Amino acid sequence: MPRPAYLLLEDGRLFRGRALGAEGVSFGEVVFTTSMTGYQEVLTDPSYHRQIVVMTYPHIGNYGVNAEDEESARPQVAGFVVHEACARVRHWKATEGLGDYLARHGVVALEGVDTRALTRHIRSAGAMRGAIAPADVDPETLLAEVRAQPPMAGLDLSCAVTTPAPYVVPAAGAARHRVVAFDLGVKANSLRLLAARGCEVHVLPSTVSLTEVRARQPDGVFVSNGPGDPEAVAHLLDLLRALAEEGRPILGICMGHQLLARAFGGRTFKLPYGHRGSNHPVKRLRDGAVEITSQNHGFAVLAEEDRIVDAPALAVTHVNLNDGTVEGLAHRELPVVAVQYHPEAAPGPHDSRYLFDEFVARMDDAKGGTRG
C-alpha cells in the first residue's frame, strides 16, 4: 500500500505525495535540478550533501541503477523528490530499481509530488530549508524543527564528504604527470578523466597541509567540487595561493573555482536558487563559443561589468548566458584556471572536457616536456 508522506518548506508550503525509499524524517536545503537523465549521478554527487533534491523531469528511475554510474561510494543527498518513480526497470546494465536502492541506502524520498509547482515555487521564493516526513507527523511541530536547521550559508560541508585518508588513482598507461587533487567532494569521473590523460592522481583530504602537498612534488593541482559555502572553507586559501605562486598549474571546478577566486581577493555570494542541471549555456569569452554545461552550485563569484570584484589579478573567461554570472576565471600571470561548471559531466554534455586537455598541456609547458 502507498505510504502517504509530504514535503514541508520553511515558509510553511506543503506538498503531498507518497513515501519512496527509506522510512523516516529527513531535513535539508530543498533545491531542484533540470537534468533529464543521470539521477544516480545526482544522488551520489557529494556537492548535494545536506540537500533535498527535486527532479524536474517527470519520470525518474526508468533505467534503474548500477554500480558503474556512481560518483561516490554512496548516495549523498539528504532526500529525493520526484513526480513519478518508474516501477519497471528497462536497461541491460540495471542491477536494482530506484526505490530499492534508496531504501537500501537509507535515503528518505517522495514521489507523486507536483514537481512543476514545487519548482516554480523555489524559483520564486528561493532555495530554502525543508523536510520530508510521513503523513502522520504533525506539520506544525515539524515546521519548528525545519526552521531550527542551520541555513546553507556559512556551512563548511567539505569536511563531511572528503576522503578520510590519502589515496592514489593510477594513470591509465604511462604516467606523464603527478597531480594532487584536493577532495572537497570530488566526483569519480573527474579522477577518471585525469587518469585517462596520463595523470597519477594523489587524492588528499581537505584538511591537508602545504608541507604534505609539497612532499608529493606535484606537477599540477586539481581543486574539486564540493558542498557548502566557500566562505567557510578559508583554511585552504593561503595554501592555494602559495602553490600558485610556486608556478604549479592549478585547475579548479565548482567549489574549487570559488575558493581560487577568494584566494586572490575575490568574494562569493549565495544565488537565489542556484544552477543545477545539464543544459546551462556558457559563453567562452576568448572566441565566443557557447558550451552547454552541467552545473550544480548554490554560490557564485561576485563580479561587476565582467570584472571580478576585489581581484584585479583575475580575468573572467566564461559567463553564464542565463544570468550573466561568472562561470570561469584565469589568473593574469600565474597558471591558474577555474570554471564554475562541471566539465567532467557524466552523463551530460561533453563540450567542456577540453579543460582537462589544457590542464595537461600547462603541466607539459611547466615541465618543458612530458614524462614518458
Image: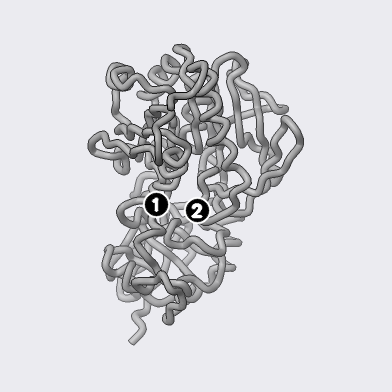
Q: Residues within 10 Å of mark 2 (few under 14, many from 20)?
A: many
The quadrant in which residue 26 appears is bottom left
- Residue at the extreme left of the image, as rendered: 165
Question: Which badge, 1 or 2, is on the more N-terminal residue?
Answer: 1
Which numbered marker is on residue 346? 2
- Asked if marks 1 and 2 touch (Cβ < 8 Å), the reply is yes
Give x and y (percent) for residue 249.
49, 22
Residue 240 to residue 107: above or below:
above
State whether residue 302 appears in this view: yes
Which numbered marker is on residue 71? 1
Q: CA distance from mark 1 to mark 2?
A: 9 Å
Side of 203 where 16 appears, left or right: right
SS at badge 2? loop
Q: Residue at x 67, y 37 (%)?
A: 319
- The three-letter code of the residue at mark 2 reads Ala
Q: Residue at x 57, y 59 (%)?
A: 34
Q: Residue at x 43, y 81 (%)?
A: 88
The quadrant in which residue 64 appears is bottom left
